[in-house]
Image (tube, grey):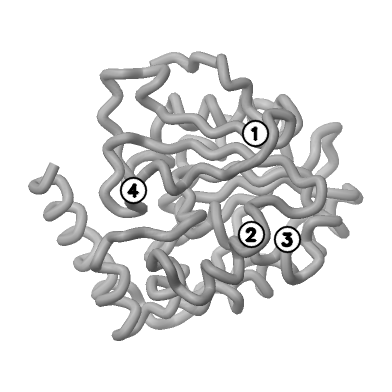
Amino acid sequence: MRLLRALLCAALLATAVTIAAATTATAAPAACQSGKRPVILLHGTFKKSGNTWDVLAPELSRGGWCHYALDYGNAGLNPIAQSARELATYVDQVLSATGASKVDIVGYSQGGMMPRHYLKFLGGAAKVNSVVGIAPSNHGTTQPLAKLLGVTFCPACDDQSAGSAFLRALNDGGDLAGSVKYTTIATRYEAVVTPYRGQALSGSADRVTNVVLQDACPLHLTEHLLIPHSRPAVKWVVNALQRGGVADPGYRPPC
């Protein structure tokens, strides 16, 4: 496990120092009609949409969902509150383009937690049906690299450090907002958003399902960097969306 942590830290640091400083603009959402709510996809820190949703996006298309990927926050490095304001603008654009009254959000890592700031502080709870988080940093990480990067060039890393002022404000008074529904999908082989159980949210079973990949697929070795590409994780996302945002806790995806 120590070796795995060291390798992941090295990979994250290498990724961080090679990210271009320029922000990639997201194209305006195209008009799309479906009997299902539109889905907004949010990448994680140091990431962009193109290399995150290669497995999930085709699955959503096959299932008949209109889906939109937002590149936010200068590859997710900017302060999370600032990125949440970008999300607020984008949700309004998607609602206008689709004619829907609400969206579903699927986010990876920071992208699974950042929408909760939008829900709680920016009026998003009235416009979002559900948030499905893949390895979401809901209660931060004890990974020391977060603080190191946070004091250099990654304000979002500092925001995601366990016990940060941002997270204290976010989680004060409970994990849920409005009538929004939630699913979290974690892996026991987590070495970035640690401990992995901190990704879970507290709430009633009709609004929250927390799942761990290895509960259904004990031999599945996926860790943080690969979990958005994991087919069991993707199947769980689809299950959650099919059920209004709350995955079936007894669902067993193909491993």
Query: Which amino acid, by three-letter code, is at mark 3?
Result: Leu
Residue 240 location in percent, x, y?
A: 64, 30
Q: Helix, strand, or loop for circle 3?
A: helix
Query: Where does label 4 land, which residue?
Result: 195
How far, Cα to Cα, is label 2 from label 3?
A: 6 Å
Residue depicted at 69% across the width and 65% down the height: 118
Query: Where does label 3 land, which residue?
Result: 119
Query: Which amino acid, by three-letter code, is at mark 1?
Result: Ser
Foreground disc of the pair 4, 3: 4
- Dot 1: within a 10 Å radius of its alpha carbon, few (fewer than 14), some, or many (20 or more) residues? few
Residue 170 location in percent, x, y?
A: 60, 66
Q: Earlier in the sequence, mark 4 or mark 1?
A: 1
Q: Helix, strand, or loop for circle 2?
A: helix
Q: Along the line of sight, which residue is nearer the eye, 38 or 165?
A: 165
Query: Where does label 1 land, which residue?
Result: 61
Q: Is residue 240 visible?
A: yes
Residue 187 location in percent, x, y?
A: 36, 36
Query: Which amino acid, by three-letter code, is at mark 2?
Result: Pro
Foreground disc of the pair 1, 2: 2
Query: Where does label 2 land, which residue?
Result: 115
Query: Which amino acid, by three-letter code, is at mark 4?
Result: Pro
Foreground disc of the pair 1, 3: 3
Residue depicted at 15% across the width and 61% down the height: 10
How far, Cα to Cα, is label 1 from label 3?
A: 26 Å
- Dot 2: within a 10 Å radius of its alpha carbon, few (fewer than 14), some, or many (20 or more) residues? many
Residue 25 location in percent, x, y?
A: 58, 73
Q: Helix, strand, or loop for circle 1?
A: helix
